[in-house]
Image (cartoon, grey):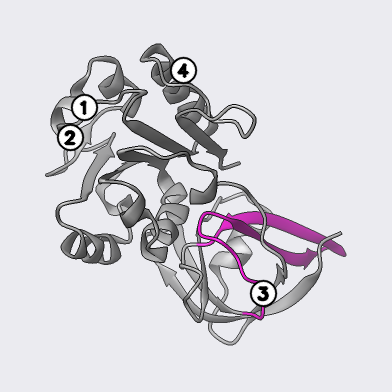
């Protein structure tokens, strides 16, 4: 059973009306970038819990999670309303295998995310190991509106630090946005647009792919990649595609 401890709220940053990041202080066990924790609240006499990936790299003092408020949700509106000095329950031990340790070697690492699933990629990139493992890191972040492209300051800082390695390609589906592709990631994969714009091919010989976010996106992109010859990465049979469903 999980061991629950108290986490103090240091900051609650509201990016948009519904997107927010909680910065927390809690003596959790060491974790690896890409892993997740669980937050819990007692609601109507029951401990309600939800899983959230760490956004912060392991070396940071404070913990950070990225979430979206669901209007009729049981817990997210309460998390959204937390203020500095409040507290929430958190599991002491991390969980999950969406880590760099599970990804085989390759030349190019493609990171696909929808919405708040960009969180674990921020942690992975800021942890630092990824830059010595791969020649190119391609971050693909798909959102509905331009305002949903959060964490730009930290992403830009990484781009400045690793200008020859980091390629950033956002997708915004519901409004035209400078620098972003419109429509869905799956369509850009089907017609080759994504590879043309990025300037790198997706091949089983050179590519490793991490997929995190909307389960429909993960399933569809995985299927399209399999059509290109890339295979699912398993411990017993290493491949090219490592997945994490975000709900």
Instruction: Estimate the x, y position of residue 13 in percent, counting from the top left.
Output: 42, 71
Residues tagged 1 and 2 counted as in contact (Cβ below 8 A): yes
Q: Does 139 sit above or below residue 51?
A: above
Upstream in sequence: badge 3 or badge 2? 3
Segment tinted magenta in the rendering: 26-54
Q: Residue furthest left?
A: 178
Q: Residue at x 33, y 55 (%)?
A: 132
> Within the image, what quadrant is residue 14 found in?
bottom left
Q: Nearer the viewer, residue 241 or 215?
A: 241
Upstream in sequence: badge 4 or badge 3? 3
Q: Which residue is mark 4?
A: 223
Upstream in sequence: badge 1 or badge 4? 1
> Within the image, what quadrant is residue 160 found in?
bottom left
Relative side of 90 to 136, left or right = right
Q: Residue at x 59, y 31 (%)?
A: 234
| CA separation in Å, label 4 and label 2 | 20 Å
Q: Which residue is mark 3?
A: 28
Helix, strand or loop under label 3? loop
Residues tagged 4 and 2 counted as in contact (Cβ below 8 A): no
Q: Does 191 sit above or below residue 92?
A: above
Upstream in sequence: badge 3 or badge 1? 3
Q: Residue furthest bottom?
A: 85
| CA separation in Å, label 3 and label 2 | 38 Å
Instruction: Estimate the x, y position of residue 163 in percent, counting from the top left.
Output: 15, 56
Q: Which residue is mark 2?
A: 198
Helix, strand or loop under label 2? helix
53 inside magenta stretch: yes
| CA separation in Å, label 1 and label 2 | 5 Å
Instruction: Estimate the x, y position of residue 168 in percent, counting from the top left.
Output: 23, 46
Screen quadrant of the C terminus: top right
Helix, strand or loop under label 1? helix
Residues tagged 1 and 4 counted as in contact (Cβ below 8 A): no
């Amino acid at each position: 059973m999980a061991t629950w401890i108290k986490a103090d709220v240091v900051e609650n940053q509201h990016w948009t009306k519904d997107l927010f990041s909680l910065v927390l202080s809690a003596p959790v066990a060491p974790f690896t970038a890409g892993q997740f924790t669980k937050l819990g609240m007692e609601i109507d006499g029951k401990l309600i819990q939800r899983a959230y990936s760490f956004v912060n790299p392991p070396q940071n003092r404070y913990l950070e999670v990225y979430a979206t408020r669901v209007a009729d949700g049981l817990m997210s509106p309460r998390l959204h309303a937390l203020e500095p000095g409040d507290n929430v329950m958190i599991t002491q031990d991390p969980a999950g295998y969406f880590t760099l340790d599970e990804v085989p070697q390759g030349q190019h690492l493609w990171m696909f995310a929808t919405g708040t699933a960009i969180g674990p990629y921020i942690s992975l990139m800021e942890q630092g190991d990824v830059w010595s493992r791969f020649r190119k890191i391609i971050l693909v972040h798909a959102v509905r509106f331009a305002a949903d492209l959060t964490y730009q300051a930290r992403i830009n800082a990484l781009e400045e630090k690793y200008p020859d390695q980091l390629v950033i390609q956002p997708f915004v589906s519901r409004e035209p946005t400078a620098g972003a592709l419109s429509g869905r990631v799956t369509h850009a994969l089907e017609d080759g647009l994504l590879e043309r714009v990025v300037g790198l091919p997706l091949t089983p010989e050179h590519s490793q792919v991490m997929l995190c976010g909307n389960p429909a996106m993960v399933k569809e992109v995985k299927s399209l990649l399999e059509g290109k010859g890339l295979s699912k990465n398993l411990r017993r049979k290493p491949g090219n595609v490592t997945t994490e469903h975000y709900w």
